[in-house]
Image (tube, rainbow, N blue to C red):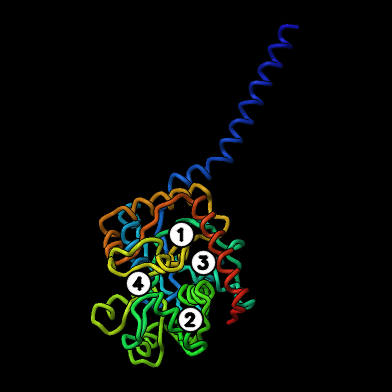
Amino acid sequence: MTPNRSSKRRLLSAGLQFALAATLASAAPFAVAAEAYPAQTIKVIIPFPPGGTLDAVGRALAQRLSEQLGKPVIVDNRPGGNATIGPVAVARAPADGYTLLFNASTFLSGPMISSAVPYRIEKDFQPIALVAKAPLSVAVNKNLPFNDIAGMVQYAKANPGKMTFAVGSIASAGHLSTEQLKRSAGINALIVPYKGTAPAFQDLIGGQIDAFVDPVLGSLQYQKAGMLKVVATTAKSRVASLPDVPTVAETISGFEFFSWYGLWAPTGTPAAVVALLNKEVNVALKSEAMAKFSAQGLELEPQSVDAFIRFQKAEMDKYQKIVTEADIKL
């Protein structure tokens, strides 16, 4: 009887060791992958041409991440298709953390205004990190007879349907903010779409357009040169680069709007890789290399992956409400 019991114990022990070895073997590739990442060049796709604030921030972030991770992090500009070509390339890339998307908040509103957009944000993309918020400025032609939001509202109500607001692109942050401003202030104004911010600013300065809501960095140079007036910003509190300019909220309680920039990966990217990238982005945002953007009016926003997911959901709900109420279509 004793030998039989001993044999059984040896068989049981061997079976347990085999099962443990098999479990460790199956888990090993995932553990090694998480420990080894990144093992090669990381590509950050930006769906706009080189130049502009988004591109500048994306390139600075890529350079900083490259230094922190010890591997090249390169920027790949993929403009075109109403800014959909870049996101499509990321959505179709392997979900391994080596192809990322750096984009502006307009990314969220695209599928809301066109069924032709070939992806869905929550289905095809894994949020990684919120990088920065860009407060918007309410810029007006310098010859208009007001210098603040209260005066602008009074002027618009005295001239119903005559005041014109430029928008650089349909459903952009500036467009959505303008629609929200119209409703919050109870004014009737005409929206005039432009193909980009440069021609919009040109017509604003020339007097063909009355007002333009766009990120602060866009209007700052013209305001300092006396070519237009910035009557307010859309931030919650006053912007450091325009300390004498009041916020819209100082006149219209609770008003806040901003463009923002974030980093995404394809859905299915390993959680360990997403967590590592989030951590490294947050470290980068505290660096001197990125601090220059704070001085220019951007608000750098380190936060967790879960916090970014909640933020994205809240912004999507906000945008959808504006798009629906204003009946915005591409």
Looking at the rendered structure, the kind of residue marked 4 is Val
Assess disc 2: are there few (<14), some (14-19) or many (≥20) residues with their C-alpha within 10 Å of its C-alpha: some
Q: Nearer the viewer, mark 1 or mark 4?
A: 4
- Label 3's element? helix
Q: Nearer the viewer, residue 126 or 186?
A: 186
Q: Indicate the position of residue 126 as horizontal and vertical percent values.
A: 54, 58
Q: Which residue is mark 2?
A: 169
Assess disc 3: are there few (<14), some (14-19) or many (≥20) residues with their C-alpha within 10 Å of its C-alpha: many
- Label 4's element? helix
Q: Is residue 153 above or below residue 236?
A: below
Q: Which part of the image, by quadrant, shows the N terminus?
A: top right
Give the mark, 4 or 2, whose residue is nearer the N terminus: 2
Q: Nearer the viewer, mark 4 or mark 2?
A: 4
Q: Which residue is mark 4?
A: 216
Mark 3–mark 1 distance (CA, rounded to whole Å): 10 Å
**Is 311 positioned to the left or the right of 298 in the image?**
right
Looking at the rendered structure, the kind of residue marked 1 is Tyr
Looking at the rendered structure, the kind of residue marked 3 is Val
- Label 2's element? loop
Looking at the rendered structure, the kind of residue marked 2 is Ser
Mark 1–mark 4 distance (CA, rounded to whole Å): 32 Å
Residue shown at 38% from the left, 70% from the top:
233
Q: Which residue is mark 1?
A: 98
Q: Indicate the position of residue 124 as horizontal and vertical percent values.
A: 59, 63
Assess disc 4: are there few (<14), some (14-19) or many (≥20) residues with their C-alpha within 10 Å of its C-alpha: many
